[in-house]
Amino acid sequence: MVEILEHMSALSDPTRCRMLLMLEKHELTVSELCSVLQMPQSSVSRHLKTLADDKWITSRRDATSRFYTMPLDDLDSAASRLWPLIREQIASTTAAAHDERRLRGVLDRRRVKSQEFFATAAGKWDRLREDLFGDSFYLWAVLGLIDPTLTVGDLGCGTGQVAEALAPWVRHVIAVDESAAMLHAARRRVRGCANVEVRRGSLEALPIPAASLDAVTCVLVLHHVPAPKLALAEAARVLRVGGRLLLTDMMPHDRAGYRQQMGHVWLGFAEDQIDRMLIHAGFGKTRIVPLTPDARAKGPGLFVATGEKGE
Protein backbone atom coordinates (compact mmCIF):
# COMPACT_ATOMS: atom_id res chain seq x y z
CA MET A 1 0.00 0.00 0.00
CA VAL A 2 2.83 2.41 0.87
CA GLU A 3 4.52 1.81 -2.50
CA ILE A 4 1.29 2.59 -4.37
CA LEU A 5 0.86 5.84 -2.44
CA GLU A 6 4.44 6.83 -3.31
CA HIS A 7 3.74 6.27 -7.02
CA MET A 8 0.53 8.29 -6.84
CA SER A 9 2.54 11.44 -6.20
CA ALA A 10 4.06 11.28 -9.70
CA LEU A 11 0.62 10.72 -11.19
CA SER A 12 -1.12 13.50 -9.28
CA ASP A 13 -0.99 15.73 -12.36
CA PRO A 14 -3.43 14.66 -15.15
CA THR A 15 -0.94 15.81 -17.81
CA ARG A 16 1.57 13.20 -16.69
CA CYS A 17 -1.13 10.55 -16.86
CA ARG A 18 -1.97 11.64 -20.41
CA MET A 19 1.71 11.34 -21.27
CA LEU A 20 1.83 7.79 -19.96
CA LEU A 21 -1.26 6.90 -21.96
CA MET A 22 0.68 7.73 -25.13
CA LEU A 23 4.07 6.45 -24.00
CA GLU A 24 2.55 3.10 -23.11
CA LYS A 25 2.14 2.42 -26.85
CA HIS A 26 4.67 4.68 -28.59
CA GLU A 27 8.20 6.03 -28.38
CA LEU A 28 7.97 9.81 -28.63
CA THR A 29 10.39 12.75 -28.54
CA VAL A 30 9.97 15.88 -26.44
CA SER A 31 8.99 17.90 -29.52
CA GLU A 32 6.38 15.31 -30.50
CA LEU A 33 4.91 15.38 -27.00
CA CYS A 34 4.86 19.18 -27.15
CA SER A 35 2.89 19.00 -30.38
CA VAL A 36 0.35 16.53 -28.98
CA LEU A 37 -0.08 18.18 -25.58
CA GLN A 38 0.18 21.72 -26.97
CA MET A 39 2.59 22.67 -24.22
CA PRO A 40 6.01 24.39 -24.21
CA GLN A 41 9.15 22.27 -24.14
CA SER A 42 10.10 23.37 -20.63
CA SER A 43 6.81 22.08 -19.20
CA VAL A 44 6.99 18.78 -21.07
CA SER A 45 10.59 18.22 -19.99
CA ARG A 46 9.68 18.94 -16.35
CA HIS A 47 6.87 16.36 -16.45
CA LEU A 48 9.14 13.80 -18.10
CA LYS A 49 11.75 14.25 -15.38
CA THR A 50 9.15 13.60 -12.68
CA LEU A 51 8.00 10.43 -14.42
CA ALA A 52 11.57 9.26 -15.03
CA ASP A 53 12.56 9.85 -11.39
CA ASP A 54 9.68 7.59 -10.34
CA LYS A 55 10.65 4.92 -12.91
CA TRP A 56 7.47 5.35 -14.96
CA ILE A 57 9.40 5.99 -18.17
CA THR A 58 12.74 5.27 -19.79
CA SER A 59 14.53 6.94 -22.68
CA ARG A 60 17.06 6.13 -25.37
CA ARG A 61 19.12 8.31 -27.66
CA ASP A 62 18.82 7.96 -31.43
CA ALA A 63 21.36 10.25 -33.14
CA THR A 64 20.36 13.76 -32.06
CA SER A 65 16.92 12.73 -30.76
CA ARG A 66 15.88 11.19 -27.47
CA PHE A 67 12.86 8.90 -27.42
CA TYR A 68 10.75 8.29 -24.31
CA THR A 69 8.57 5.27 -23.60
CA MET A 70 6.80 3.50 -20.75
CA PRO A 71 8.48 0.14 -19.95
CA LEU A 72 5.21 -1.60 -19.12
CA ASP A 73 6.76 -5.03 -18.60
CA ASP A 74 9.45 -3.65 -16.28
CA LEU A 75 7.29 -1.64 -13.87
CA ASP A 76 7.48 -2.67 -10.22
CA SER A 77 4.54 -4.58 -8.78
CA ALA A 78 2.95 -1.51 -7.15
CA ALA A 79 3.09 0.51 -10.37
CA SER A 80 1.78 -2.47 -12.36
CA ARG A 81 -1.28 -2.64 -10.09
CA LEU A 82 -1.84 1.11 -10.08
CA TRP A 83 -1.48 1.88 -13.78
CA PRO A 84 -4.57 -0.07 -15.07
CA LEU A 85 -6.76 1.92 -12.67
CA ILE A 86 -5.27 5.24 -13.79
CA ARG A 87 -5.44 4.27 -17.46
CA GLU A 88 -9.13 3.44 -17.22
CA GLN A 89 -9.92 6.86 -15.75
CA ILE A 90 -7.71 8.92 -18.09
CA ALA A 91 -8.57 7.11 -21.34
CA SER A 92 -12.21 8.20 -21.19
CA THR A 93 -11.48 11.92 -20.80
CA THR A 94 -11.98 14.54 -23.51
CA ALA A 95 -8.36 15.63 -23.19
CA ALA A 96 -7.16 12.08 -23.94
CA ALA A 97 -9.39 11.94 -27.03
CA HIS A 98 -7.84 15.16 -28.34
CA ASP A 99 -4.36 13.79 -27.56
CA GLU A 100 -5.12 10.68 -29.60
CA ARG A 101 -6.23 12.75 -32.59
CA ARG A 102 -3.14 14.95 -32.49
CA LEU A 103 -0.90 11.91 -31.92
CA ARG A 104 -2.20 10.38 -35.16
CA GLY A 105 -1.10 13.56 -36.90
CA VAL A 106 2.40 13.29 -35.39
CA LEU A 107 2.74 9.67 -36.51
CA ASP A 108 1.41 10.54 -39.96
CA ARG A 109 4.13 13.18 -40.31
CA ARG A 110 6.73 10.54 -39.50
CA ARG A 111 5.37 8.35 -42.30
CA VAL A 112 5.23 11.24 -44.77
CA LYS A 113 8.87 12.07 -44.07
CA SER A 114 9.86 8.46 -44.70
CA GLN A 115 7.72 8.26 -47.86
CA GLU A 116 9.25 11.48 -49.20
CA PHE A 117 12.71 9.98 -48.79
CA PHE A 118 11.80 6.80 -50.67
CA ALA A 119 10.05 8.79 -53.41
CA THR A 120 13.31 10.62 -54.15
CA ALA A 121 15.67 7.70 -53.40
CA ALA A 122 14.00 4.88 -55.36
CA GLY A 123 16.25 5.33 -58.38
CA LYS A 124 19.44 5.19 -56.36
CA TRP A 125 18.29 2.98 -53.47
CA ASP A 126 20.41 -0.06 -54.33
CA ARG A 127 23.55 2.05 -54.68
CA LEU A 128 22.79 3.89 -51.44
CA ARG A 129 22.44 0.61 -49.50
CA GLU A 130 25.60 -0.79 -51.08
CA ASP A 131 27.55 2.32 -50.06
CA LEU A 132 26.33 1.93 -46.46
CA PHE A 133 26.31 -1.84 -46.00
CA GLY A 134 28.11 -3.48 -48.94
CA ASP A 135 26.57 -5.45 -51.80
CA SER A 136 26.02 -8.84 -50.12
CA PHE A 137 24.72 -8.13 -46.60
CA TYR A 138 21.23 -9.39 -47.48
CA LEU A 139 22.63 -12.74 -48.63
CA TRP A 140 24.34 -13.21 -45.26
CA ALA A 141 21.11 -12.22 -43.50
CA VAL A 142 19.14 -14.88 -45.43
CA LEU A 143 21.29 -17.55 -43.74
CA GLY A 144 19.19 -16.88 -40.65
CA LEU A 145 16.44 -18.96 -42.30
CA ILE A 146 18.54 -22.13 -41.96
CA ASP A 147 17.36 -24.69 -39.40
CA PRO A 148 19.83 -24.32 -36.48
CA THR A 149 19.63 -28.05 -35.64
CA LEU A 150 21.21 -29.16 -38.92
CA THR A 151 24.40 -31.15 -39.35
CA VAL A 152 25.86 -30.11 -42.69
CA GLY A 153 28.61 -31.56 -44.85
CA ASP A 154 30.68 -29.10 -46.91
CA LEU A 155 32.00 -31.42 -49.60
CA GLY A 156 35.12 -30.19 -51.37
CA CYS A 157 35.45 -27.44 -48.79
CA GLY A 158 38.59 -25.90 -50.25
CA THR A 159 39.79 -23.12 -47.94
CA GLY A 160 36.66 -23.37 -45.77
CA GLN A 161 34.76 -20.33 -47.02
CA VAL A 162 31.35 -22.05 -47.08
CA ALA A 163 31.96 -23.90 -43.80
CA GLU A 164 32.85 -20.63 -42.11
CA ALA A 165 29.69 -18.98 -43.46
CA LEU A 166 27.46 -21.85 -42.29
CA ALA A 167 29.01 -22.31 -38.84
CA PRO A 168 27.08 -19.59 -36.95
CA TRP A 169 23.75 -20.86 -38.26
CA VAL A 170 23.83 -24.67 -37.85
CA ARG A 171 24.63 -27.21 -35.14
CA HIS A 172 27.62 -28.89 -36.78
CA VAL A 173 29.64 -28.67 -40.03
CA ILE A 174 31.87 -31.44 -41.40
CA ALA A 175 34.21 -29.99 -44.03
CA VAL A 176 35.87 -32.48 -46.37
CA ASP A 177 38.60 -32.02 -48.97
CA GLU A 178 41.24 -34.19 -50.57
CA SER A 179 43.97 -31.54 -50.79
CA ALA A 180 46.25 -31.28 -47.77
CA ALA A 181 47.12 -27.68 -48.67
CA MET A 182 43.45 -26.69 -48.90
CA LEU A 183 42.69 -28.39 -45.60
CA HIS A 184 45.55 -26.52 -43.93
CA ALA A 185 44.04 -23.23 -45.14
CA ALA A 186 40.56 -24.35 -44.08
CA ARG A 187 41.69 -25.26 -40.57
CA ARG A 188 43.29 -21.84 -40.25
CA ARG A 189 40.11 -20.17 -41.44
CA VAL A 190 37.68 -22.01 -39.13
CA ARG A 191 39.90 -22.26 -36.05
CA GLY A 192 37.50 -19.98 -34.19
CA CYS A 193 34.44 -22.08 -35.12
CA ALA A 194 34.03 -24.75 -32.44
CA ASN A 195 31.29 -26.56 -34.39
CA VAL A 196 33.34 -27.10 -37.58
CA GLU A 197 35.21 -30.38 -38.06
CA VAL A 198 37.72 -30.73 -40.91
CA ARG A 199 38.38 -34.15 -42.48
CA ARG A 200 40.57 -35.32 -45.34
CA GLY A 201 38.96 -37.49 -48.01
CA SER A 202 37.76 -37.65 -51.60
CA LEU A 203 34.24 -36.88 -52.73
CA GLU A 204 33.99 -40.35 -54.28
CA ALA A 205 34.75 -41.98 -50.87
CA LEU A 206 33.63 -39.59 -48.14
CA PRO A 207 35.00 -40.15 -44.60
CA ILE A 208 31.47 -39.76 -43.21
CA PRO A 209 29.08 -42.52 -41.97
CA ALA A 210 25.94 -43.25 -43.95
CA ALA A 211 22.77 -41.30 -43.20
CA SER A 212 24.53 -38.96 -40.74
CA LEU A 213 23.95 -35.54 -42.35
CA ASP A 214 20.90 -33.34 -42.79
CA ALA A 215 22.30 -31.35 -45.72
CA VAL A 216 25.37 -31.19 -47.94
CA THR A 217 26.89 -28.40 -49.99
CA CYS A 218 29.10 -28.86 -53.03
CA VAL A 219 30.22 -25.45 -54.25
CA LEU A 220 32.36 -25.17 -57.40
CA VAL A 221 33.81 -28.63 -56.88
CA LEU A 222 32.08 -31.10 -59.20
CA HIS A 223 33.99 -29.91 -62.31
CA HIS A 224 37.21 -31.06 -60.58
CA VAL A 225 35.89 -34.57 -59.80
CA PRO A 226 36.84 -37.39 -62.23
CA ALA A 227 33.67 -39.36 -61.39
CA PRO A 228 30.86 -36.86 -60.67
CA LYS A 229 28.15 -39.54 -60.69
CA LEU A 230 29.97 -41.43 -57.96
CA ALA A 231 30.46 -38.20 -55.96
CA LEU A 232 26.72 -37.46 -56.08
CA ALA A 233 25.95 -41.04 -55.05
CA GLU A 234 28.29 -40.59 -52.07
CA ALA A 235 26.53 -37.35 -51.17
CA ALA A 236 23.23 -39.24 -51.16
CA ARG A 237 24.73 -42.03 -49.04
CA VAL A 238 25.78 -39.72 -46.20
CA LEU A 239 22.43 -37.91 -46.14
CA ARG A 240 19.47 -38.95 -44.06
CA VAL A 241 16.20 -39.59 -45.89
CA GLY A 242 14.77 -36.19 -46.71
CA GLY A 243 18.21 -34.56 -46.49
CA ARG A 244 19.02 -31.81 -48.96
CA LEU A 245 21.83 -31.32 -51.47
CA LEU A 246 22.93 -27.85 -52.59
CA LEU A 247 25.20 -27.96 -55.64
CA THR A 248 26.74 -24.91 -57.32
CA ASP A 249 28.82 -25.22 -60.48
CA MET A 250 29.49 -23.83 -63.93
CA MET A 251 27.21 -24.03 -66.93
CA PRO A 252 28.77 -25.42 -70.13
CA HIS A 253 31.56 -23.21 -71.52
CA ASP A 254 34.40 -23.35 -74.05
CA ARG A 255 37.32 -22.22 -71.91
CA ALA A 256 39.48 -25.26 -72.48
CA GLY A 257 42.46 -23.49 -70.93
CA TYR A 258 40.89 -24.07 -67.52
CA ARG A 259 41.95 -27.73 -67.78
CA GLN A 260 45.61 -26.75 -67.67
CA GLN A 261 45.37 -23.54 -65.65
CA MET A 262 43.11 -24.79 -62.83
CA GLY A 263 42.88 -28.54 -63.16
CA HIS A 264 39.29 -28.62 -64.38
CA VAL A 265 38.15 -32.04 -65.56
CA TRP A 266 34.77 -30.91 -66.91
CA LEU A 267 33.93 -27.73 -68.83
CA GLY A 268 30.69 -27.14 -66.98
CA PHE A 269 27.45 -29.10 -66.86
CA ALA A 270 24.21 -28.75 -68.81
CA GLU A 271 20.93 -28.51 -66.89
CA ASP A 272 19.54 -31.80 -68.20
CA GLN A 273 22.88 -33.50 -67.52
CA ILE A 274 22.88 -32.44 -63.86
CA ASP A 275 19.23 -33.36 -63.48
CA ARG A 276 19.84 -36.90 -64.78
CA MET A 277 22.87 -37.36 -62.50
CA LEU A 278 20.93 -36.20 -59.44
CA ILE A 279 18.00 -38.49 -60.15
CA HIS A 280 20.34 -41.41 -60.82
CA ALA A 281 22.06 -40.76 -57.47
CA GLY A 282 18.74 -41.01 -55.63
CA PHE A 283 17.63 -37.40 -55.38
CA GLY A 284 14.09 -36.23 -55.97
CA LYS A 285 12.41 -32.82 -56.08
CA THR A 286 15.34 -31.57 -58.13
CA ARG A 287 15.57 -27.95 -59.14
CA ILE A 288 18.20 -26.19 -61.23
CA VAL A 289 18.37 -22.39 -61.42
CA PRO A 290 20.93 -20.28 -63.31
CA LEU A 291 22.48 -17.56 -61.14
CA THR A 292 22.37 -13.92 -62.21
CA PRO A 293 25.93 -13.07 -63.26
CA ASP A 294 27.88 -10.60 -61.17
CA ALA A 295 28.80 -7.63 -63.39
CA ARG A 296 32.38 -7.84 -62.12
CA ALA A 297 32.74 -11.60 -62.64
CA LYS A 298 35.00 -12.85 -65.43
CA GLY A 299 34.21 -16.57 -65.26
CA PRO A 300 31.49 -18.68 -66.90
CA GLY A 301 27.87 -18.54 -65.78
CA LEU A 302 26.88 -20.51 -62.70
CA PHE A 303 23.84 -22.53 -61.64
CA VAL A 304 22.45 -23.80 -58.34
CA ALA A 305 20.97 -27.28 -58.20
CA THR A 306 19.05 -28.71 -55.26
CA GLY A 307 17.64 -32.12 -54.53
CA GLU A 308 16.15 -34.16 -51.70
CA LYS A 309 17.24 -37.69 -50.83
CA GLY A 310 14.41 -40.15 -51.33
CA GLU A 311 13.47 -43.31 -49.46
Image (cartoon, helix red, strand yellow):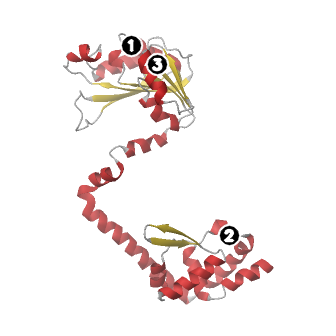
Q: Of marks 3 and 1, which one's residue comes earlier in the chain?
A: 1
Is 79 on the left or on the right of 100, as rendered? right
Q: Residue at x 29, y 29 (%)?
A: 302
- Check disc 3 and report the residue beneath it: 235
Give the answer, above or below, for where 80 lies relative to 173. below
Most distant residue in the right direction: 1
Q: Position of residue 266 (x, y in %)?
A: 28, 15
Quote the CA–CA distance across marks 2 and 3: 55 Å
Q: Of marks 2 and 1, which one's residue comes earlier in the chain?
A: 2
Q: Of marks 2 and 3, which one's residue comes earlier in the chain?
A: 2
Disc 2 marks which amino acid? Leu
Task: Classify mark 2: helix, strand or loop.
Answer: loop
Q: Residue at x 20, y 19 (%)?
A: 255
Disc 1 marks which amino acid? Lys
- Check disc 2 and report the residue beneath it: 75
Quote the CA–CA distance across marks 3 and 1: 10 Å
Q: Nearer the viewer, residue 176 or 143?
A: 176
Cβ atoms at labels 3 and 1 below 8 Å apart: no
Q: Residue at x 49, y 72 (%)?
A: 66
Give the answer, above or below, for where 124 lies relative to 257. below
Q: Mark 2 against mark 1, which lies toward the viewer?
A: 2
Q: Nearer the viewer, residue 64 or 205?
A: 64
Asked whether the viewer can see residue 71, the reply is yes
- Label 2 CA crowd tier, 10 Å (few <14, some 14–19, many 20+): some
- Label 3 CA crowd tier, 10 Å (few <14, some 14–19, many 20+): many
Q: Position of residue 57 (x, y in %)?
A: 60, 74
Asked whether the viewer can see residue 311, the reply is no
